[in-house]
């Protein structure tokens, strides 16, 4: 195989690939063996017609085209490896010469990764922030524990709904005197003050008692996800079926025993303080990593091909779709809830996609220059974590990731994290 590489544009390369005549002959034989089994030719059993007969029946061009399909992909892959280019999209292919007894020549045009011009990436000046833990922070955590372990108490008919209560209600909604779809529910549990219902709905239930009926008047927001309801005034006929109220335990030694492994409130507070300090340390370190990375990326220059940004946007949309499906939702439902559509979503994602692509390109360039790679030991360490997480044998995890091409992605992720570590270590942190 011979390869001639030509730079067509800034991020576009041309390859002229010449395949030896011997390989062409082998490909034509493969083509014949494949096609002869698919074609019914009168007078011959399927798959048994001679090559000359098949050629007369379907045409020589069909056999040569199939042979070209057999040869293009492996020879293109070898040419990519030989030249060291990094394609970022599917290539366009033009056949120059293809015939029996002659070399096969074809041209490929493909977009490649752009060249990155790095700025300064060592000695970056960064200030490490401090996040001191205060008594107020500790008390806030205690309040959260108090709320989490609060008991829900059923109230009696003489009690009134207060902000923070949970009301069990049945309701039916009307617009212009007509009941509308989706406006009816029985025994719905509603947290008063949660803001989950239409603005103004929850507040109008404050003061109501069990078995009381109230008319609640609201106006749907202009940006409401159901367009037929947006901006409309509605009347809800509501009946209160029950009221629950949180009963908070006093924050004392007994509370500490109930909600933790500690025997005293002082020990619980000390543990909360330590956890908050550990979190503050991690937060400060992450801030430094982000600042270093942002400065290094900002200092670099690269002209990103639009296809790389579009591919990243598509990946972001796919990721959102997967996460929604885990919650039992479809992308179309999300569009309704968020009052958006595919075009708006992609436009919303595009700036972050462009930033992410630039970050990857910069890190890849630094990793290549500094010879930063994932070692086999590091790869095995990550695989062991996955194996432990999913309770699977290590060899099975490695085999599964290899089959899906995800092993290379894991190697890439390790290398990129090591590159960020390198940048942080090479920085001046005050």
Image (cartoon, rainbow, N blue to C red):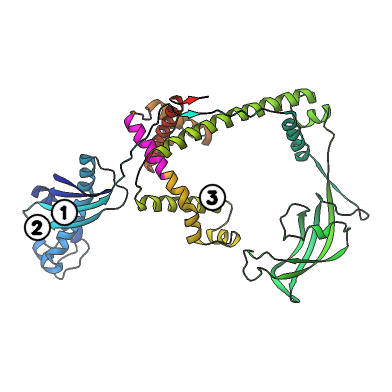
The mark tally for this picture is 3
Q: Residue at x 45, y 26 (%)?
A: 427
Q: Which mark is residue 106?
A: 1
Element at badge 1? strand
Residue 99, numbered circle: 2
How many angstroms separate mark 1 from mark 3 (CA)?
43 Å
**Marks 1 and 3, the one that precedes in the sequence:** 1
| Other residues around mark 2 within 10 Å, as few (<14) / some (14–19) / many (≥20) | some
Quarter of the image where one finds residue 251 = top right
In the image, taking residue 375 as reference, residue 164 lies left or right, namely: right
Q: Residues within 10 Å of mark 3 (few under 14, many from 20)?
A: some
Q: Is residue 361 above or below residue 68?
A: above
Q: Which residue is mark 3?
A: 323
In which image quadrant can residue 419 be found? Answer: top left
Quick check: can you spot residue 399?
no
Q: Can residue 228 be found in the magenta stretch?
A: no
Say left or right for 76 vs 200: left
Spatial separation of the CA atoms under disc 3 and disc 2: 51 Å
As helix, strand or loop, the secondary structure at mark 2 comes to: loop
- Residue at 45% x, 52% y is 350
Q: What residue span does the magenta drawing correspond to?
A: 357-369
Disc 1 to disc 2, C-alpha distance? 12 Å
Residue 107 showing in the rendered view = yes
Q: Are marks 1 and 2 in contact (CB under 8 Å)?
A: no
For residue 273, which quarter of the picture? top right
Q: Mark 1 or mark 2: which is in front?
A: 1
């Amino acid at each position: 195989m011979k390869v001639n590489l030509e730079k067509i544009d800034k991020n576009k390369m041309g390859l002229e690939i010449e395949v030896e005549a011997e390989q062409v002959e082998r490909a034509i034989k493969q083509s014949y063996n494949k096609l002869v089994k698919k074609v019914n030719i009168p007078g011959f059993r399927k798959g048994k017609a001679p090559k000359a007969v098949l050629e007369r029946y379907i045409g020589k061009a069909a056999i040569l085209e199939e042979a070209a399909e057999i040869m293009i992909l492996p020879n293109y892959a070898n040419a990519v490896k030989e030249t060291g280019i990094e394609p970022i999209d599917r290539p366009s292919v033009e056949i120059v010469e293809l015939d029996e007894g002659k070399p096969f020549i074809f041209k490929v045009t493909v977009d490649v990764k752009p060249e990155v011009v790095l700025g300064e990436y060592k000695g970056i000046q960064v200030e490490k922030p401090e996040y001191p833990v205060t008594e107020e922070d500790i008390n806030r955590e205690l309040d959260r524990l108090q709320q989490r372990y609060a008991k829900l108490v059923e109230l009696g008919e003489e009690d009134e709904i207060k902000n923070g209560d949970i009301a069990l209600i049945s309701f039916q909604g009307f617009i212009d005197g007509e009941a509308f779809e989706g406006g009816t529910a029985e025994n719905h549990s509603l947290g008063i003050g949660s803001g989950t219902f239409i603005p103004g709905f929850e507040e109008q239930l404050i003061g109501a008692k069990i078995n009381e009926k109230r008319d609640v008047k609201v106006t749907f927001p202009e940006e409401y996800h159901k367009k037929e309801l947006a901006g409309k005034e509605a009347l809800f006929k509501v009946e209160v079926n029950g009221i629950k109220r949180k009963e908070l335990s006093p924050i004392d030694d007994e509370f500490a025993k109930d909600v933790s492994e500690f025997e005293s409130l002082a020990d619980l507070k000390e543990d909360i303080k330590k956890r908050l300090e550990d979190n503050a340390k991690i937060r400060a370190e992450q801030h430094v990593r982000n600042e270093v990375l942002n400065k290094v990326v900002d200092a670099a220059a690269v002209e990103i091909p639009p296809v790389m940004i579009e591919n990243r946007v598509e990946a972001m949309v796919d990721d959102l779709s997967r996460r929604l499906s885990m919650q039992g939702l479809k992308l179309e439902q999300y569009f309704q809830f968020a009052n958006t559509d595919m075009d708006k979503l992609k436009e919303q994602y595009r700036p972050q996609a462009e930033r992410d692509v630039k970050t990857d390109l910069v890190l890849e360039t630094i990793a290549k220059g500094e010879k930063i790679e994932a070692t086999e030991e590091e790869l095995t360490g990550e695989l062991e974590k996955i194996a432990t997480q999913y309770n699977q044998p290590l060899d099975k995890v490695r085999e599964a990731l290899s089959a899906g091409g995800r092993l290379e992605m894991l190697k890439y992720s390790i290398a990129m994290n090591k590159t960020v570590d390198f940048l942080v270590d090479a920085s001046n942190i005050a």
